Image (cartoon, rainbow, N blue to C red):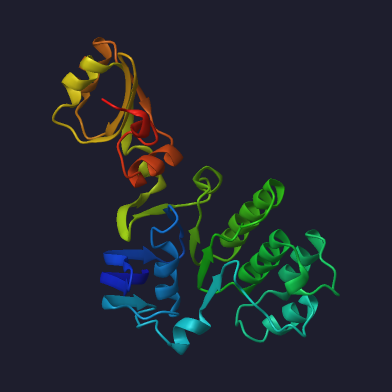
């Protein structure tokens, strides 16, 4: 069952379209990664889903209802990002205590265990925490709330690598124990791909790709070898990425070619390899086929 459906969803600002004509669906009880570069429209899309913003045009349904200023959506959704604020007069221990009154599925025991594990003091105040510790505390709120729709917008901002690893493990363990729809926005594809089931890749307000992790791993192949030989096989194929040094080239194409062509490539001396998920996301969101190499290519 789909928790979120969108049809021709668009959000315009004075500077242009942050979200441009999106049509997609996100299932419940699944961890979906929202991936894209800065300015791709990820946060705008997440805030539309959470009901913070109203779309300019198109249709958006969350729990089968329009999310904007919707009590049902807001009571079943938590939005975690680095800008979360709490009453200045409350200590973080008091914040945890009061959080239980807002969220129907609040797990007080989990919140306390995470609180102790990450070394927080009951007398600390949220505004006085370091950036990484604020993100860690926000993560505790996001997990313990156990909302049917949990939105995590770059939740690991400021965390060191060991805390990020703990966060990802905690997220996966808690999801297994209490399955729900989780959307995780992140730039660190290599860190999160093992816990994701789907990836929705955004570029300049549009969805470039929306597939399961297993399908994405089979989406493209890399070709390494003589540039002219590779060109002979790819002249009628869309190239996702290409780079070259002298006569040697590396080209990435979609894996929608038959086995006989692949065999002929190998016989011609072309090395065929898989493409890492993180690299594919970079290639698909790049403005040029060659990336930074195009800056130095005067040919």
Name the outermost residue toward the front: 298
Residue positioned 70% across, 52% down in the render: 163
Q: Name the quadrant containing residue 145.
A: bottom right
Left or right: where does residue 256 sit relative to residue 87?
left
Q: What residue appears at the point 69 percent right and 62 percent down from the top-left corner?
A: 131
Left or right side of 170 for 7: left
Q: Position of residue 298 (x, y in %)?
A: 29, 27
In this view of the protein, which residue sits in the foreground, 83 or 237? 83
Estimate the x, y position of residue 78 in percent, counting from the top left. Answer: 54, 75
Q: Can you give x and y, in whole percent of width and height, for residue 273 in the image?
A: 37, 25
Residue 263 visible from this viewpoint = no
Percent across and percent down for residue 102 are: 62, 85
| Picture layout, residue 275 above or below residue 40 | above
227 in relation to 106, above or below: above
Residue at image location 48% in from the left, 52% down from the top:
196
* Front-lying residue, 225 or 263: 225
Tell me if residue 155 comes above or below residue 201 in the rendering: below
Q: Quadrant of the C terminus?
A: top left
Q: Residue furthest left?
A: 236
Residue 54 position (above or below residue 177) = below
Query: In this rendering, does residue 284 appear at all?
Result: yes
The N terminus: image quadrant: bottom left
Compared across the picture, whether 246 is left or right of 167 comes to: left
- Give the residue at x 75% y 64%: 114
Answer with the quarter of the image where residue 42 lies: bottom left
Query: In the rendered picture of this protein, how many numbered marks are placed on residues?
Result: 0
Residue in the foreground of this view, choosing between 111 and 92: 92
């Amino acid at each position: 069952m789909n928790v979120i459906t969108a049809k021709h969803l668009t959000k315009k600002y004075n500077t242009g379209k942050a979200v441009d004509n999106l049509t997609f669906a996100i299932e419940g009880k699944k961890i979906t990664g929202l991936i894209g570069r800065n300015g791709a429209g990820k946060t705008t899309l997440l805030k539309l889903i959470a009901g913070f913003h109203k779309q300019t045009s198109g249709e958006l349904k969350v729990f089968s209802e329009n999310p904007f200023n919707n009590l049902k959506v807001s009571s079943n959704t938590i939005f975690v990002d680095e800008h979360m604020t709490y009453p200045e007069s409350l200590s973080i221990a008091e914040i945890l205590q009061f959080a239980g009154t807002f969220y129907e599925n609040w797990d007080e025991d989990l919140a306390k265990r995470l609180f102790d594990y990450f070394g927080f003091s009951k007398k600390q105040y949220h505004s006085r925490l370091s950036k990484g510790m604020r993100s860690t505390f926000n993560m505790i709120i996001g997990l313990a709330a156990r909302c049917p729709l949990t939105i995590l917008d770059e939740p690991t901002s400021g965390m060191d690598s060991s805390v990020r690893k703990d966060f990802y493990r905690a997220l996966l363990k808690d999801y297994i124990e209490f399955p729900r729809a989780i959307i995780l926005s992140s730039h660190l594809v290599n860190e999160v791909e093992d816990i994701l089931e789907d990836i929705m890749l955004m570029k300049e307000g549009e969805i470039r790709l929306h597939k399961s992790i297993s399908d994405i791993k089979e989406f493209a192949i890399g070709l390494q070898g003589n540039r002219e030989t590779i060109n002979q096989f790819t002249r009628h194929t869309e190239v996702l990425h290409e780079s070259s040094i002298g006569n040697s080239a590396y080209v990435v194409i979609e894996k929608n070619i038959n086995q006989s062509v692949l065999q002929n490539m190998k016989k011609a001396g072309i090395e065929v390899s898989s493409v890492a998920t993180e690299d594919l996301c970079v290639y698909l969101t790049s403005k040029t086929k060659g990336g930074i190499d195009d800056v130095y290519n005067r040919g």
